[in-house]
């Protein structure tokens, strides 16, 4: 009876170790955002690994679809004749037309800047509040007439329309 009990204890310890290794692999994959990787484990952890791999595959497919959708969106926004910027705590995308209005030759120079940095000082609080409301889906005006200030002695009067979209995994 002692030998059988000892065998059961050893078997449970091995099983627990295999499950623990599988869980650690899954944790590493998820934390690293490497959803194309798979949990490699055998023995008693095989069912866990199989289910985890199935979920990882579904997540990887969704990530691929999202990245393809975002590439299409960037292509569409970049080709518009209207000035377009995507703002989330700062500009994450601007097309060439918007860059010209903001006094920049390269749209990439605008990435990371807050929209409020680009407007006339009289409009900073208004624009900050408006964008915050749009992102939080709070009631707000459809359009604002504001002035961009590409250089200290110049202004460009524009109509600002803001719509909440999902872009690069966030609003």
Image: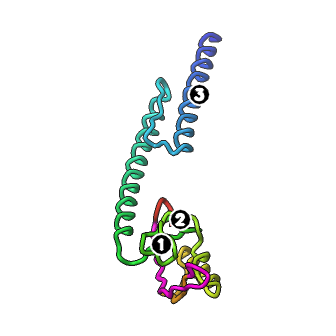
Image spot of residue 169 (x, y percent):
48, 59
Task: Mark 3 vs mark 1: give the one in front.
Answer: 1
Magenta-colored stretch includes residue 34? no
Tell me the CA gap for discs 3 and 1.
Answer: 58 Å
What is the magenta segment's predominant secondary structure? strand
Tell me the CA gap for discs 3 and 2.
Answer: 53 Å
Q: Is residue 93 above or below residue 133?
A: above
Kindly identify which residue carries mark 1. Answer: 99
115 or 51, which is in the foreground? 115
Q: Is residue 64 above or below residue 53?
A: below
Cβ–Cβ under 8 Å for marks 3 and 2: no
The residue carrying pointer 2 sits among few (fewer than 14), some (14 to 19) or many (20 or more) residues within 10 Å by Cα, namely: few
The disc placed on residue 28 is: none
Tell me the CA gap for discs 2 and 1.
Answer: 8 Å
Kindly identify which residue carries mark 2. Answer: 109
Element carrying mark 1: helix
Element carrying mark 3: helix
The disc placed on residue 16 is: 3
């Amino acid at each position: 009876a002692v030998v059988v009990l000892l065998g059961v204890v050893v078997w449970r310890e091995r099983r627990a170790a295999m499950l623990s290794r599988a869980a650690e692999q899954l944790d590493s994959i998820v934390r690293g955002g490497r959803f194309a990787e798979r949990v490699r484990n055998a023995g008693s952890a095989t069912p866990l690994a199989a289910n985890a791999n199935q979920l990882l595959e579904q997540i990887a497919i969704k990530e691929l679809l999202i990245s393809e959708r975002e590439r299409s969106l960037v292509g569409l926004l970049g080709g518009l004749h209207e000035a377009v910027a995507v703002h989330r705590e700062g500009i994450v995308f601007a097309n060439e037309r918007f860059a010209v209005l903001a006094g920049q030759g390269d749209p990439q120079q605008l990435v990371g800047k807050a929209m409020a940095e680009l407007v006339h000082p009289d409009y900073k609080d208004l624009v900050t509040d408006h964008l915050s409301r749009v992102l939080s889906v709070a009631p707000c005006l459809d359009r604002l007439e504001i002035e961009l200030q590409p250089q200290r002695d110049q202004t460009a009067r524009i109509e600002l329309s803001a719509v909440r979209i999902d872009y690069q995994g966030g609003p």
